[in-house]
Each structure stands twice: as structure tokens, then as C-alpha cells.
Amino acid sequence: MASRRLARRETSMNPVSIFYSYAHKDEEFREKLVTHLAALRREGLISEWHDRKLRGGDDWAGEIDDELNRALVILLLISPDFIDSEYCVEKELKRAMEHHEAGEARVIPVIVRDFDREINPEVFPFMKLQFLPSDGKPIKQWDNENAAFVNVAKGIRAVVKPLADARRQADEVRRVMDKRERGWDASGQAKVEADLTKSREALRESIEAAKEAGIGSEDSLTMAKGTLALAEDDYSAAREVFSEEEVESAENMALGAVRDADQAIQEAITKLLIRADADYGLEDWERALVHYEKVLALLERHSTGGPATVDRQVVGGRIAGCHFHLFVVNSSAGGALSLKNKARAIQHFGAFRKTVKNFLGPVRREPEVRFGWGGALRKDGAPRSWLKGIYLPGKRTDVQRMDDGEENGPYVSLWSEESSFVLGTTAHVDLVTHPFLSWRWMAIELPEKGDIRDSKRIDEALSLAVTFVDESGAWQQFYYGWDTAAPMGTIIKGGLFSLKWKLKVITSGAVSLGEWVECGVNLREDIREVYGENVVPKTAVMLMVQSNTQYTKGSGAGCIGEICFSTTKSPPHAV
């Protein structure tokens, strides 16, 4: 029984499920009612189940029980034969009223043929409920039977539409949140944020309307409430919507489903995504990774490739983000790695590369491919389209978005103290067609003893790294740095696990401290000059901005504006 109670929540973005309870002598009325609810069905507001959908060999009692548990609206077609039916009264009516009184479903008695209205309401508890048709007159006694069924259909619509609207609005909120997650352009993100505010308020209103309609129980609105909590960045509340037991139960049902498998899979995906997004927001990377990977596995089983509201690229990006954070956690730059942490770091770095490769999406080839700092912020201060990874926490790893007007546009300040951290984002840019890279940055404080030429003082207030894939398929990194002491043009090299990197000092010393410095380079030529002609950069796959002060035990701070890849050499553009 407990497992079925867990299974009954219909929390996905599916239509509202309706269960018909009726005596077989009233099948004619059930068939006509199904016809009159066709508009609701075609609008995607409802799905229906009745015992004529059973097939030969089915466990009919178990199937009826499961569908009754799943339903959010239970229609009782009341007649003398219904009252006379042992199964209708003792099984279906009893269970239906349990769900109704628990706020888990809405029971609607539809009077198809008249009966003794003096029956005991304690024995027949549907007598306490509002009947349809609206005046309580049995359908059989209407002069115009069609008008009676229209009256019933309108009554059912009034009940199911508010909940269906709440679910659809939750759909819209998730679409906007996914769009926000993928964006870099500040002007576009401003509209996305406005859209999210509007859709979030509409969802809140829809939830309240569903409650007022009497169908918006705590149980039936879990998906909508979980989505609203995520949209408000209340990850703790979102995480409480579904327990691990419920998520696991939904996944098992989806994997074992034969009939209505897509619906079961969609329900499981919805639960897993809410739980995964909450885990991600709470920085529980291990658990979030498990849930996101299960979402992808279920998407592969869905006959249509998964619900339209699930953005595979966003899910893939989140998986990459989990691996990125777990790589950073296990490869702290502050000291010697244990064999166990090194093995984990290598594993997550490999998985990160594979995931990025699979979910980068199409190569961006617009004349100027920009990566700005607009849009919503995470609680750690970083824009949502960038990940913040802390190699060594130290005393300070601050990120703050700033904007002093059109000239410099939105930009971020980074401040490290005895620490090392990075902001990273994926970037699928063709370096053959877009070899030019431009940006502006400003150093506010340089690490006092920093000198990239000394491995014990290899700290810089600011550095910009491009992770690229060469024609052989190898991943490598190229950095541009603002160094305290090393002169411009200085080149150093290093590596972390299988990723080789080289750095070129492009700005040096405190001469321009506190001033914006505009940088414009031919990235492709610089890479070939430093790495050699045998390395032919093909595609940029990731951008990273770093601030490091872990070796000199001092502090460093700086700002960086929009980063732009372009087909022709040009100065950076404000977002």
C-alpha cells in the first residue's frame, strides 16, 4: 500500500488524470460522457481511464487499484446499479473518498439515473459532495440529454482547468529558466529575467487558483510548487518536494512500465529534474550528478525523445558542471594530492571533457561571438552562464558583477586572498573563422610577490584562459595573464593531468593599475607561435577567468569585461 501511495502523485507536466467509477449497466452514460469531454482531452487538459481499457490477461484488480491511486479526479456515475454494486461501493467509492478527504484527489458524483436520496451519507459519503449536473437533476430526466452532458462537462472543466493551468505554467517557468541558464548576452538576458518574473508570478497565481478550485492539494501541486521554489532560488524548499524514496520509486516504475511507459517516464523525469536542480543549487554535486544522469538515461527510453520542456543541452551542461566542480574539489592547487583524490580528479576531468563534447551544441559562427556578464546571478555572485570553481578557498574568493554605464558595460570583479578560483563557461567557437579575441580588463591590486617565472610565486590577479581542441582532437589551454613582475611576452608552460597549458604575459606591472586596458589578439597565431606549427587550433570549447594568490599568500583583485571572438580584428564591445 505504501508504495502505491508514493506512486499515485501525478507530478509531471501531464494532463490531469480522470478515473471513471460506474456500474456496467450505465456504460452508455460513461461512453457519452467520454464523448462530451473530448474537447478537454484534445486541449491536453485531461487523460482518462476506465475498466474497458483492460486487456486480456491483465491483473484487473491491481490495474484498477493503480489507476485509482494515480487519478486526480474521480468521477462517480451514480445510479441505483452503482449503489447496488459491491465493487463500486466497497472498493472504488471507499478508496476514492480516502483520497478526497486526504486532499489527494477530487471526487465528483455525476447523477446519471435517480436513486433514493434518503440514503445514509455515512454509508454513501458522496451524498456530502456537490453533484453534477449542477442542479442535481439526473441526466436521464433531462428533456435535452445533450444539454445535461454539456452541463456536466462544464463542471468538470471548472475543476481540472486550474490545475492543468498550473502545470502548464510550471512548464513555461522551466523553459524560461533553461533559457536563462544558456544565455550570455546582457540585453537578451534582461528580457529573459523579465519573462521569468512574469511567468513566476503567473505560476504562483495558478497554484492559488487550483487550491481555490478544490483540486490544488499539496499532493497534486508538488511539481508546480517545486518548480516555483527553483525559480525563486529556494533550493532547500525544492529539495523537500520529493524524497529520495519517491524519486527512486518513480524511476523504478518508469523502467518497468509497459503500458503508458512514456507517461511514467515523464513523471520520473520531472521528479528527478526538480531534485537534481535543487541538489545543484545546494552544491551537492555528487547527488545532483546521479540524478541528472538518470534523467538522460530515461530520455533515451522515451519514444519521442523526452518531454518537449526538457532541454537536453541544459541537462548536459549541468552534468558537465557537476564534473567540473568535482574535478576542482579533488584537485586542490594548494598542496599535494592524495592518490585517491588524484584518481577522482582525473576521472571527473575526463567525464567533463566527454560531456562538453557531447552537449556543446552547434558551433557559433556569427561575426562576433560574445561572452558577457549579464543575466541573473547565482548566490556565489557569478552570472548563471558561468561556473565558479574554487581550487583553494583561502581567506577570500569574491565575485561581484558591476556596471558603470555604457562604456564598459556589465563586468565582473574578482578578488582573491591566499586563494585560487576560476569562472568558467563553455564556448563552442570555430577558431579557423574566428581567430581574433578581444576583451578589456583592469587590475586593482597585484599579488605583491607574484612572478609567473618562479614556480613558487606563480600568482596573478587576472588571467584569461581558452581551452581549445586542435586538429588531432587533443585538448589544450592557452592563457593570457596580467603579471606583477614578468615582462610582456613572457611564456611559461605547465600541465594538470592530461591537459597541457601555456601562458603568455600580455599586461605587466602596476603602470596601468586602476585603469581599463583593452586587449586584442590573434589567438590562433599566438597558439601556433607558442605551441609550434604542429599544433593547429580548431575549436574553442571553454573560457576561464582566474585570480590566484595561493602561493604568495597575498591578495589580488581585478575586473574583466565582455570577451569577444570575431572574424576580423576589432576592439572589444560593451555589452
Image (cartoon, rainbow, N blue to C red):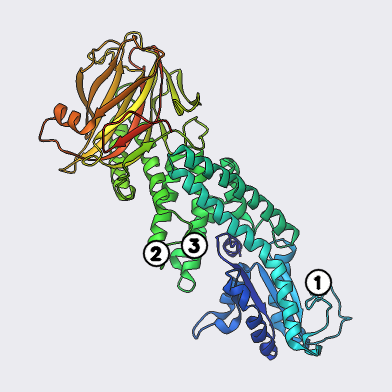
Residue holding disc 2: 301
Residue visible at 34% across and 9% down in the picture: 510
Q: Position of residue 319 (x, y in %)?
A: 39, 45
How far is mark 1 from mark 3, CA to CA?
33 Å
Disc marking residue 555? none
Asked if residue 554 is positioned above or below residue 504 in the image, the reply reads above
Asked if residue 136 is positioned above or below residue 263 in the image, the reply reads below
Residue 7 in the figure: left or right of residue 539: right
How far is mark 1 from mark 2, CA to CA?
42 Å
Residue holding disc 1: 130
**Kind of residue at disc 1:** Gln
Picture quadrant of residue 85: bottom right
Residue 72 in the figure: left or right of residue 388: right
Picture quadrant of residue 140: bottom right
Picture quadrant of residue 479: top left
- Judge by depth and name the residue closer to the eye, 167 or 18: 167
Mark toward the start of the polypeptide (1 vs 3): 1
- Judge by depth and name the residue closer to the eye, 425 or 407: 407
Asked if residue 199 is positioned above or below residue 330 in the image, the reply reads below
- Judge by depth and name the residue closer to the eye, 517 or 288: 517
Secondary structure beneath disc 3? helix
Disc marking residue 266? 3
Secondary structure beneath disc 2? helix
Residue visible at 41% across and 34% down in the picture: 372
The quarter in which the C terminus is drawn is top left
